[in-house]
Image (spheres, rainbow, N blue to C red):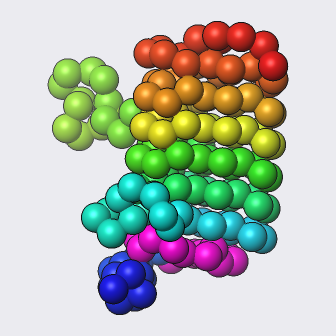
Amino acid sequence: MSKLRIIKYKLLSDAKNVIGTANFIQPCQLKGEGEIVFKKNITIGIDPSPFLYSGYAYIEARNNNSKILIDDNVMINNNIVIISDGEGITISKDVLIGTQCEIYDSDFHNLEIDKRLSGRGNTKAVYIEENVFIGSNVKILKGVRIGKNSVIANGSIVTKSIPENVIAGGNPAKIIKNL
């Protein structure tokens, strides 16, 4: 059943510029005009793990200038959402990401009331450095850099950069302790 769902979402994908490939355990829809780069040894979806059969991964480099780079040896659990609307998203080597995480480099809508429907939102690049461990149900918002070796606790909303070698968590995420 999973293989048929993987084929279905591959057919639903319309990404214009995908470089490399990943090992898709869970179905993944790739969308957008921009560039999606998969380096070596990337796994998207984990079996056994929640949401394997009830969801799918969604990765979109929305505009021509949008870029998503997923570097070597990255493991992403089920139901990931990664959307670049502008500056780009970089996930460095040896990163682990839990279930149902969301990573965005944009507000998507203008915050001014009269431009909310017609204007573009603010964008700012997201960088997740090497050997970061991101728990389940984490949201990482535009302009965030997570320093190498850091851990982001389950359910956190990361609105500001996190230095390397720390555990951070909460809403908004704050440093809990040094590693």
Q: Where is residue 117 drawn, in percent x and y?
A: 19, 38
Left or right placement of residue 83 versus residue 12 in this view? right
Tell me if residue 21 can be seen.
yes
Residue at left offset 67%, top offset 39%: 133
Residue at left offset 79%, top offset 42%: 131
Assess whether residue 24 is covered by the magenta stretch. Answer: yes
Q: Nearer the viewer, residue 2 or 95?
A: 2
Q: Where is residue 102 drawn, in percent x and y?
A: 45, 43
Could you say which quadrant of the image residue 66 lies in? bottom right
Residue at left offset 78%, top offset 71%: 40
Q: Which residues are magenta?
A: 16-30
Assess whether residue 40 is covered by the magenta stretch. Answer: no
Q: Where is residue 92 drawn, in percent x and y?
A: 76, 49
Total marks in image: 0
Residue at left offset 28%, top offset 64%: 54
Q: Nearer the viewer, residue 153 or 160?
A: 153
Q: Is residue 116 above or below residue 2?
A: above
Q: Is residue 137 above or below residue 166?
A: below
Could you say which quadrant of the image residue 130 lies in? top right
Tell me if residue 28 can be seen.
no
Considering the image in quadrants, where does the C terminus appear?
top right
Q: Is residue 51 above or below residue 119?
A: below
Left or right placement of residue 8 versus residue 147 in this view? left
Considering the image in quadrants, where does the N terminus appear?
bottom left
Report the residue that reaches farthest toward the front.
48
